[in-house]
Amino acid sequence: MTTAIAAERAASVKKTIARHKGMAREKQTLGEIDASLGRASANLGRISSLGTRKLRKRVEMRGTSGRFSNVMTRSPSLEPSRRYSRDLVKALRQVSAPSVALVHLHTEHISSLDRAVGILSTLVESEQLSRAAARAEAARALRRAGLDQSRINPRVASVAVLLSDALLNSPTLEPSAERRDALRFGRNLLVDPFVGNEQEEDLFLRLTRAGWEMTPPFDREAFAALSGAGDG
Amino acid sequence: MDLQESVIRQVHTLVGWPASPRYSDIRGRLTEKLLTVVDADEEWGWDGPMTAVWSEGETIHLAVTPSELVVAIEDPEVDPIALCRDVISVVREELRIAKFEFLGSSSIRLAPAPSIGELNAWLAERMGSLGRYANYDPFGGKPKSLGIQVEFGDDDFSYDVDLRAMTASEAAEGDDFFSEREDDFPPAALLLEVRRSRLAEIEASKALDLWEESLTKNLEAGERFDAILREEP
């Protein structure tokens, strides 16, 4: 009995999540439409100098209604109505053709992993690999991807961090063909759907054999005093 | 099959109480207080009797009705126990809840797998003799999806454990997670959900500690179960 009710409650949580997602999307769309109206209005500002003042006025009016709808949804004493977002979409569609071309309702998403793979690919195939600044940029992008992937795919995260360490801790290393190959192997693991245990170990061995340093070099000067104390 | 170690992707809490008649009177104030807890400003909405509040990055979601509260967290940086304690305390105080009727928590983990086909075969193997139906010809051969559900329980709390094979598109399109981006999920993964719930009246003053202990046990049980899964059958 308890289990059946618990399962029923759990099912209601899933439904809540589904409804929640819908609400968040709807509100996000409203925000995007507001932003788009702002962009359209700004662009029309430029167009207006060519004599399209009437069109600009219309967009400004829609922009005002967009802000008003946000005021409505912000007030806890009033229920936000789906009507407002629908009105806004309708309003956007009514704006004349030139301004519609300026409105972008969807933003493109590029994951930190895609970005890191892109930077690493360019680096591996170019002369930039011998430049410390270019290596540092790739190392930073890989570290960011590793952080994001740690909650999605821990082994992909581990590969990204390993490559980042190699690029960061080998600042004076000349890029030989073997060294480039080791990085290419790592880059390919990042785009594979699954990274196995053996592949992860293989990458470590390839990087080490090629001479990449995964840890900072030993600082003899910093430990010189300690060494002296030991001798005495 | 090389099943990877799992990662906790969502923790959610569900608590229930006898419906509070104060709800409609204090709904606005409650919304504002919940927005403060998740450090949000405009991320809220009312849908029928449900008050919904979410964080700016949409990784924390709260939903309150006159008789229930759901807190769902998908942010690994957030301490679920501390946040849920704050939210439950606000709701309890605002609605003047004297006793709770239901305390529940759930943790969902995803363990990346090489492919959905291998994962289904792996699950079928763990179903023992029942697993042979996974390739049953009259149903069309290979199954599209496969899952195992196990229930445990004692006098107070019951555990429900769900194991399901899941693709990234199923995770993004389904109702388990808030994220709708496929690249937020591994291409193929084993979903492990552990639910722990108690259906019995308890004084509000004692409920919070009991709920906290329950969520802690839930997380520990999920971790142990995850380790067992990667052992050979």
Image (tube, rainbow, N blue to C red):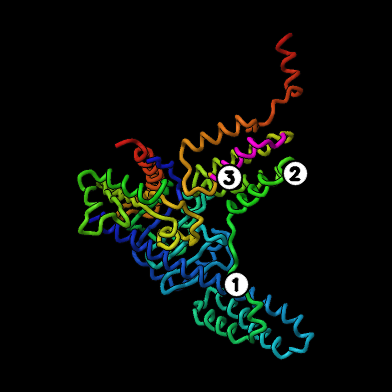
State the separation of the CA atoms marked 2 and 3.
19 Å
Amino acid type, mark 1: Glu
Chain to which mark 3 belongs: A
Kind of element beneath mark 3 = helix
Q: Which residue is mark 1?
A: A32
Kind of element beneath mark 2 = helix
Amino acid type, mark 2: Ala
Chain to which mark 1 belongs: A
Which label belongs to residue A187?
A: 3
Q: Is residue B206 visible?
A: no
Image location of residue B160, percent across then percent down = 30, 50
Tag 2 and tag 3 share a subunit? yes
Q: Which residue is mark 2?
A: A133
Image location of residue A16, percent across then percent down = 40, 65
Query: Residue A181 colored magenta?
Result: yes
Residue lying furthest right in this view? A49
Query: Residue A185 colored magenta?
Result: yes
Sequence-earlier tag: 3 or 1: 1
Amino acid type, mark 3: Arg
State the separation of the CA atoms marked 3 and 1.
35 Å
Q: Is residue B68 above or below residue B9?
A: below
Circle 1 residues within 10 Å: few <14, some 14–19, many ≥20: some
Sequence-earlier tag: 2 or 3: 2
Q: Toward the viewer: B40 or A107?
A: A107
Kind of element beneath mark 1 = helix
Q: Is residue B104 above or below residue A196?
A: below
